[in-house]
Every structure is written in structure tokens, then in C-alpha cells.
Image (tube, rainbow, N blue to C red):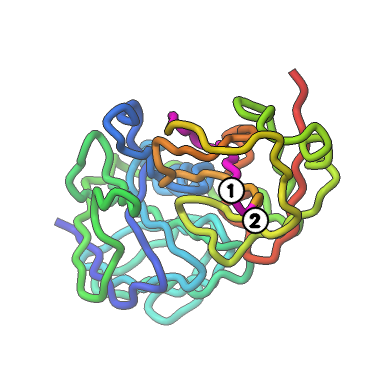
Amino acid sequence: MTALQVVRAGPLTTVQDLGRRGVAHLGVPRAGALDEPALRAANRLVGNAPGAAGLETTLGGVALRATAAAVVAVTGAPAPVRVAGRPAAWGAPVGVPAGAVVEIGAATYGVRSYLAVAGGIAVPELLGSRSADLLSGLGPAPLAVGDLLPVGQAAGPYPPVDLVPLPAPPGELVLRLRLGPRADWFTAEAVAGLARSRYQVAEASNRIALRTEGPALARAREGELPSEGMVLGAVQVPPDGRPVVFLADHPTTGGYPVVGVVPGPDLAAAAQARPGTPIRFALLRA
């Protein structure tokens, strides 16, 4: 069986597919690729099903040795790609000879790059997914040097797709926001001012949430709620008043009020926004 051996793990590289769906009632987050369109594109380039498992890197890339000839593609955050020490294409299928090392360098902008290999990463499924869930500790651990990642059987000749265009990582992150269910826990002035306020992506952001720096939202009510269900994209407001946007590894319940929800299609850009990136919220009505 073909396998990829980890030569350099990078700051944080995890196995991700499209995540665990329908298990939130068990207290299990969805997990899965934070930039889902980028993983789908990488899989398309190597002829995989859209939900095949690949690798998600974080800022610093990864290096892997192929034990047999393989075809890979890298998408998401732009980064230099090298095979056997030679420059190779980003955003296109690339052949890797047996024994060669494929390297993804540091992202030139954006945060997360995705590597798909023809056949997909074939680690065992858990609750219907191969994804690493860093909050619950489910699925494979983040990659470490020496790990051997099994590769599944390729579906056949990969399709003649030379390039899959993807949007560039944002210079300014604009997140649409549908108010509720607890917008009434904040003053009307604070809610109306969300669209005018300017925030930045905070250093503490991770796979669980995009955290913000900026003006605090003023509360209209004191106290806290009993824990209630949380959804992907929920914008929870902790006691410091700075909005927190829940991403794929978010907890399934929480007790701080949710001022609104960011639609799923906006979250891929959130996953690629580096600390310091300006953020604006665009309020959706009805």
C-alpha cells in the first residue's frame, strides 16, 4: 500500500475531510476542513470524491516522503511546493515518484493549505469521518515526524483538470451576520453599531474559533444563560464583549449569548484570515 511518511510536520498539520455530520447531540463537534472549498478543489484535482481525507497545514507547511509513486495537489493558502527538491505547481496535480519528498513551504499569505493525494488519506474512520477533532481529541492526532499515513486506492486516471481557481485570502474579512438568537441581550446601539465597528483577527484564533480584537459590545442584560446548543458560525460574546466566531472544532454547547450567526459560505475566508486582518460585520435583515 502507498503511504506518506512525515518528514517535517509543520506547526500544525491535521488529517481532515468534510467532518462529522449529525453527531452534535452526542457532544461531538463537526470538525473537518476549515476551508472546505479548498479541500474539495484539491480532491477534484487528483480525481478523489469531494469528501476524501487530505491534510490541512497551518502557516508553516509540511514535508512527506511517498513510499510509492503518487499524485498530489495543493490548494488553499498559496505556498511554494517542491517535489524531490524541484519547484512544482500549486493548485494543479503533481506526480511524486516513489521515494521522493513533497514539500509545502510556509504560506505566502493566508493560513491553511490543503494537500490531497489520489486515493485519499486512509486512516480509520471514527463516527463517519477521518477528521482530527482537536477540541474533543477524536480522530488522528496532529502529524508528528515519522508518522506513516496510509493512502487509499486511487479511483482511476485523474480527470483532465489543470487548475481550479479559488478566491485569494482576504485583505479585509467581511462576514455577513444574521442576528439572533440572543441579540436582545445587547443594547440596540451596540447591535446597530456592529456594522460600523472595526475589528481585527486576534492572535488567539484557532480551529475552534476566530477571535476578535476591537470595541466591546455593550450588554442590555446581566447574568448568563443556561448552556444551549451552538452551531457552526455562531458569534458568541464572552464577558469581555469581543465577538467570537465559532469554526469547525467549536463546542456543541455554550452559556454566553449568541448575537448572530455567520453563514457557512463566509467561513472559508475566515479560516484564511491571518491575525491582524481587519474584520467588518455586514448585518443581514430578515
Q: Residue furthest top?
A: 286
Residue marked by disc 1: 244
Question: Mark 1 packing: few (<14 Cα in 10 Å), some, or many (20+)?
Answer: many
**In percent of the image, x 36 and y 49: which residue is there?**
16
Q: Is residue 36 above or below residue 225?
A: below
Task: Give the distance between the C-alpha atoms of the residues marked 1 and 2, in whole angstroms.
Answer: 6 Å
The residue that mark 2 highlights is 212
The residue that appears at 36% across and 44% down in the rendered structure is 17
* Camera-nearest residue between 232 and 214: 214
Residue 93 in magenta? no
Q: Quadrant of residue 182?
A: top right
Q: Which residues are magenta?
A: 228-240
Instruction: Give amino acid for label 2.
Output: Thr
**Residues at discs 1 and 2 in contact (Cβ within 8 Å):** yes
Can the viewer see residue 202?
yes
Q: Is residue 232 magenta?
A: yes
| Residue 242 pos. (x, y %) | 65, 52
Query: Across the whole image, how many numbered discs are drawn on residues?
Result: 2
